[in-house]
Image (cartoon, rainbow, N blue to C red):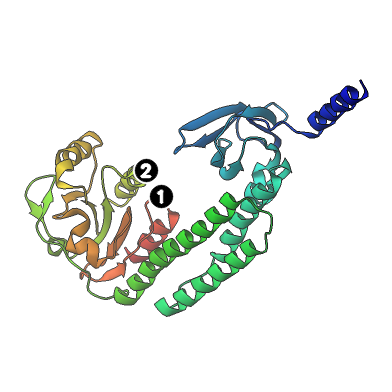
Amino acid sequence: MKKILFLFAGLIIISCDTEVKKDYVTFSGTITNKNSDSIVISNKEMKYRKVLSVSDDGSFSDTLKVKDGFYSFYDGGEATKLFLKNGYDLNMTLNTEEFDETIVYEGNGAENNNYIAEEALIKEKLLDFDIDEMTANDLDVKLDEISKQLIEFLDKQKTLDTMVVNNSRKSVEGTIKSYKGYLGDLIALRTNLPKGSPSPTFSNYENHAGGTTSLEDLKGKYVYIDVWATWCGPCKAEIPHLKKVEADYHDKNIEFVSVSIDRPKDHEKWIAMVTDKELGGVQLFSDNNWESKFVKDYYIKGIPRFILIDPDGNIVTPDAPRPSNDKLREMLDELI
């Protein structure tokens, strides 16, 4: 009988010491100066999306049944990255007036997510530098040093989840590669296409109004060129601003030219959009989309891109401000 009692007592002790892992995440927090009445947690790759309600006082709490991995937290104004694993009991606080700077996590899962938030701030600070006086070699040295600092910061963390560590290493590599390509192109623009040098040209681009147009046809006026495509969201977002600038400078010595780099199969879509949106200025269709010589000569790898050329066909700037940027009007007012 004593043996049975001891065995029963032992089973009770074992069961008390064994924690049953939750198959969900408990996620709560408080948002100061909330942007909306809800939060969206999502992961496109995993086809996961859940909306969490935010109370009047900015608090929220819910459970999330997830696959281990990275998710987006969006509060209606800004977003940040989360690392979630079932079993986490995570509490978050933030103030939207200084969104990234005020994110703090507590509870199970806090260490990994605090690291992610801090790493984002460090990246932002390190990558905020001026390239005006840099050569391509200077840029390589600078970005290599930044990469080293980010990896050193990661290596100091000894208890992060392996998924977080691996993702961070890939993220550093991807970020540095992306910046090297983008900033390298800007340096190449400044070096190879300086202000006052002859502009690369295009010839016989199809004109939506009929016939063809070459850059040479536009000499005698300033030419503000918008390189865009019908599928490009940021390009389309600039259309209302471009229309307003065109209207405000319609009696000035400047021609507004939009060059579509849509693929040939989207030619009809281009025709329809120019008509439906009542796009003004000179609407042209490039001869070979991304592979057009004009596009490659201007090192265009992302759109929209805006270019300003003077009446003699020389470059004012190979990377002009967007129509939505007040600096464009300041530039035009000084020139025209």
Residue 261 x/y as whole percent = 22, 51
Residue 299 x/y as whole percent = 29, 65
Residue 49 x/y as whole percent = 51, 30
> In this orientation, which residue lies closer to the viewer: 113 or 218?
113
> In this orientation, which residue lies closer to the viewer: 280 or 140?
140
Instruction: Identify the mark at residue 237; answer none if there is no mark.
Output: 2
Q: Quick check: 112 above or below 13? A: below
Instruction: Identify the mark at residue 324; answer none if there is no mark.
Output: 1
Q: Nearer the viewer, mark 1 or mark 2?
A: 2
Residue 77 seen in render: no
Horizontal side, residue 6 vs residue 186: left or right: right
Residue drawn at the location 75% of the way across and 33% of the way down:
19
Instruction: Choose the circle earlier in sequence order: 1 or 2.
Output: 2
Instruction: Identify the mark at residue 64; answer none if there is no mark.
Output: none
Amino acid under label 1? Ser
**Mark 1, residues whose alpha carbon is within 10 Å: few (<14), some, or many (≥20)?**
some
> In this orientation, which residue lies closer to the viewer: 240 or 8?
8
Residue 74 seen in render: yes
Amino acid under label 2? Ala
Residue drawn at the location 59% of the way across and 29% of the way down:
65
**Mark 2 element type:** helix
Horizontal side, residue 130 vs residue 273: left or right: right
Q: Residue furthest top?
A: 1
**Mark 1 element type:** loop
Task: Tell me the distance, in whole angstroms, between the alpha carbons under discs 1 and 2.
Answer: 9 Å
Task: Assess whether mark 2 and mark 1 are in contact (beta carbons under 8 angstroms).
Answer: yes
